[in-house]
Image (cartoon, rainbow, N blue to C red):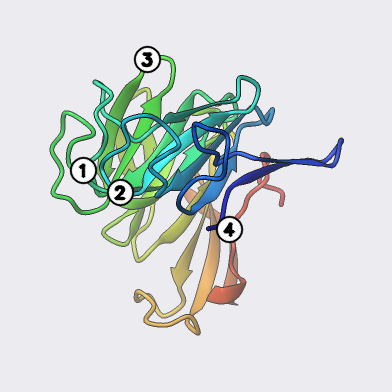
Amino acid sequence: EPDTYLHEIETSTTTMLSISQTGSSSKSHSYEPDISANGQYVVFESYANDLVLNDTNDKGDVFIRDTQANTTSRISVNNLGVEGDGSSYGATISSDGLIVAFESMATNLSDIKSSGNYNVLFRNIDSAKTIHVSSGYSPSLSGNGKYIAYVSNNNVYIYDIEGAISKKITTTVGLTPVLSSSGRFVAFTTPANGEVFSDRSTEFDLNIYDTESGKIVKKITNAIYKHIANAISKDRIY
């Protein structure tokens, strides 16, 4: 089964992160990692049931590995520590490692009861609280941990964590958002024909939206989906 690893460039050392409680490789696959700015914390999703104690839901969960303390904790739990009744995916972590956003099909992770469709949530590591953001998917967390971009009903929204409010930034179909570190800029794709793609030959436009001006400040037209992997530098230049 595939595992999640951390490679330290300076020392050229590679460490397995998705390890069981006995220190061996876990029983199932782990993938889609994201890492904090200093490399101490790594979040990933896994179907393994031996990464932490009392993992009995037989669902995909989101975990966080502290590479200094060598501990693994489950993120996709509610405020009482109860595991989700549906799978969770797509974890993204803030630069300081204190906020983790993810999507989930679980209905029991927050006080807001969801329908079992995809929902966007975030967990505050310090307060051990899991907060429901909206129905939706494909979350992207700003590096400062203040904003979450996500897709709902084929539109891109930005959620202000402190203000607990969402704002729609697209007027037509918008997909795959990625936030800059400050949360000011959002890169996202739009199908060139204005419709949700039916196959991966669909042409897309890549957009960069400035939340301060409320305008798209850059557009790359007619990119092919298979070549799009949204990423944006801290200052939006790259």
The residue under label 1 is which amino acid type?
Asp
User: Does the residue at mark 4 contact the one at mark 1 (Cβ under 8 Å)?
Assistant: no
Tell me the distance, in whole angstroms, between the alpha carbons under discs 3 and 4: 31 Å
Closer to the observer: label 4 or label 1?
1
Q: Which residue is mark 2?
A: 59
The residue under label 4 is which amino acid type?
Asn
Q: Which residue is mark 4?
A: 230
User: Does the residue at mark 3 contact the one at mark 4 (Cβ under 8 Å)?
Assistant: no
Q: Position of residue 23 (x, y in %)?
A: 57, 34
Tell me the distance, in whole angstroms, between the alpha carbons under discs 4 and 2: 28 Å
Q: Which residue is mark 1?
A: 85
Closer to the observer: label 3 or label 4?
3
Residue count near mark 3 (Cα–Cα under 10 Å), binned few <14, some 14–19, many ≥20: few
> Could you tell which of marks 1 and 2 lies nearer the N-terminus?
2
Q: Position of residue 70 (x, y in %)?
A: 60, 25
Q: Residue furthest top?
A: 127
